[in-house]
Image (spheres, grey):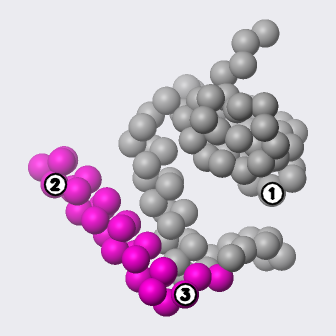
């Protein structure tokens, strides 16, 4: 058996390979080269991939969700201030603009 993701710690942190942390992984499935892990404690499904662009995109999508307080019903979440939301939106905008420029 070989560990391909996770640190062994119990928490919630997205990241690549050994930098990701799960609360309570309870299921796993694959689709192509992607691996999906369900985390029962956190209430999420995480995509494990070696595609850096996919990870960055999903991280920025998460920032947009946090900025506009999009979350699962009954899931604990931290409200952010208007200033924090504005900073997150600016960071995501910068990411998307940079990505578009790199694609040109």
Point out which mark residue 81 bears: 3
Residue 91: image quadrant is bottom left
Q: Say which of 51 and 85 sits in front.
A: 85
Q: Look at the image and tell me whether residue 44 can be seen.
A: yes
Identify the residue shown where x is 57% and y is 73%. 66
| Image coordinates for residue 43, horizontal then vertical, percent | 80, 57
Q: How many marks?
A: 3
Horizontal arrangement in the rendering, residue 49 relative to residue 97 (left or right): right
Instruction: Check disc 2 and report the residue beneath it.
Output: 101
Q: CA distance from mark 1 to mark 2?
A: 35 Å
Among the two numbered marks 1 and 2 on one chain, the one whose residue lies closer to the N terminus: 1
Instruction: Check disc 1 and report the residue beneath it.
Output: 43
Point out which mark residue 89 bears: none
Q: CA distance from mark 1 to mark 3?
A: 25 Å
Disc 3 on helix, strand or loop?
loop
Q: Look at the image and tell me whether residue 34 can be seen.
A: no
Stretch of the chain drawn in magenta: 79-104
> Which of pointers 3 and 2 indicates the residue nearer the eye?
3
| Image coordinates for residue 42, horizontal then vertical, percent | 80, 55
Classify 34 as above or below 100. above
Q: Say which of 83 and 25 sits in front.
A: 83
Classify 15 as above or below 91. above
Identify the residue shown where x is 72% and y is 74%. 77
Identify the residue shown where x is 82% and y is 43%. 10
Quadrant where the N terminus is found in the figure: top right
Horizontal arrangement in the rendering, residue 30 relative to residue 94 (left or right): right
Do residues under tags 1 and 2 come within 8 Å of each other at their CB atoms? no
Among the two numbered marks 1 and 3 on one chain, the one whose residue lies closer to the N terminus: 1
Assess disc 3: are there few (<14), some (14-19) or many (≥20) residues with their C-alpha within 10 Å of its C-alpha.
few
> Which of pointers 1 and 3 indicates the residue nearer the eye?
3
Classify 24 as above or below 76. above
Assess disc 2: are there few (<14), some (14-19) or many (≥20) residues with their C-alpha within 10 Å of its C-alpha.
few
């Amino acid at each position: 058996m070989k560990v391909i993701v996770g640190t062994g710690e119990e928490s919630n942190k997205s990241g690549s390979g050994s930098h990701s942390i799960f609360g309570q992984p309870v299921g796993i499935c694959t689709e192509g080269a992607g691996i999906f892990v369900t985390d029962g404690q956190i209430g999420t499904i995480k995509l494990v991939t070696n595609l850096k662009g996919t990870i960055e995109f999903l991280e920025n999508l998460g920032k947009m969700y946090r900025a506009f307080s999009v979350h699962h019903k009954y899931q604990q979440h931290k409200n952010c201030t208007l200033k924090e939301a504005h900073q997150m939106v600016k960071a995501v905008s910068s990411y998307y603009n940079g990505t578009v420029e790199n694609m040109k």
